[in-house]
Amino acid sequence: MKRLNIAIDGPAGAGKSTVAKLTAQKLGYTYIDTGAMYRAVAWQALKKGVEHDNRAIAELACNLDLKLTNIDNKTNVTVAGHDITEAIRTPEVSRLVPKVAQVGELREVMLKLQQDMAKPGGVVMDGRDIGTRVLPHADIKVFLTASIAERARRRWQELTAKGYSISLAELEAEIACRDKEDCEREIAPLVAAPDAINIDTTNLSIDATVASILELHREKQASV
Ligand code: CDP
Ligand code: CDP
């Protein structure tokens, strides 16, 4: 059986990483979290104090010793052997990452890395520009959405469980701001590919979403 590539895009909190990870697990495919790659660069830019210097950000990306490892249904992220899995999920990094993600030279470096990762096939990759730019010939493209209120509620639950004190209204405003930055940027904006299947997860369970994608995979595999 041919190992297919699956592209999953959508805004923050739509369920991309949860659904992509489970789909990859069911199919024995590799899950690639491209958001974690952009987050790692934003984290390092903050650490080095170069978050306003586009050239320095692009240089960071070129020299980044980044590793993504999937262990126990979780993507572990290291930079130069240093575990930054949790550090890249802070609200501070979340606020910075859409700004860093607008740097064209950085996106070029990421594009090449991500395309190389998908070359062997059997990859489930999630992000913002996977179906439009990174894997324009992906076998299956899914665009996940959910209402802003539901996405903020999901993120709020995650952050409060980790001990962060943030109001739901504040988080909703932050997510709306990140959506706007991601959708309105010049290079590789967040937009559904014309041939993507749209799935609204506002009232859809994780299992039901995964089941829909597995069905798309079954149909596609039968046709190739
Ligand atoms: O998990 P969440 O949806 O909050 O975000 P993420 O997937 O970790 O991505 C964080 C940010 O990285 C996004 O808001 C984008 O600004 C950027 N990103 C991107 O520009 N292109 C991608 N393929 C993936 C992420
Ligand atoms: O990757 P993305 O930002 O699109 O979303 P996620 O990190 O996969 O999902 C955000 C949160 O929403 C997680 O805690 C998921 O368990 C939850 N979720 C949900 O409750 N129902 C769904 N249909 C999808 C995700």
Image (cartoon, helix red, strand yellow):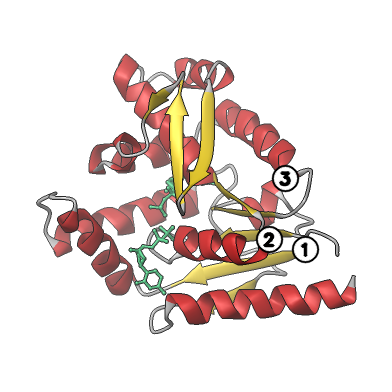
Chain-order first, disc 3 or disc 2 = 2
Position of 54 compared to 138: left or right? Answer: left
Looking at the image, is 28 positioned above or below residue 151?
above
Amino acid type shown at disc 3:
Ala
How far apart are the two marked residues, 1 and 2, measured between alpha carbons?
Answer: 6 Å
Category of crowding for the residue at label 1, using alpha-carbon neighbours closer than 10 angstroms: few (below 14), some (14–19), many (at least 20): some
Assign a secondary structure to mark 3: helix
Q: Which residue is mark 1?
A: 139
Category of crowding for the residue at label 2, using alpha-carbon neighbours closer than 10 angstroms: few (below 14), some (14–19), many (at least 20): many
Kindly identify the residue that appears in the image at 39 percent across and 30 percent down. 42
Q: Which residue is mark 2?
A: 6
How far apart are the two marked residues, 3 and 2, measured between alpha carbons?
Answer: 10 Å
Asked whether the beta carbons under mark 3 and mark 1 sit within 8 Å of each other, the answer is no
In the picture, the disc for residue 118 is 3
Q: Position of residue 107 (x, y in %)?
A: 59, 34
Amino acid type shown at disc 2:
Ile
Kindly identify the residue that appears in the image at 54 percent across and 44 percent down. 34
Kindly identify the residue that appears in the image at 30 percent across and 35 percent down. 87
Residue 168: name its quadrant: bottom left
Asked whether the beta carbons under mark 1 and mark 2 sit within 8 Å of each other, the answer is yes
Chain-order first, disc 3 or disc 1 = 3
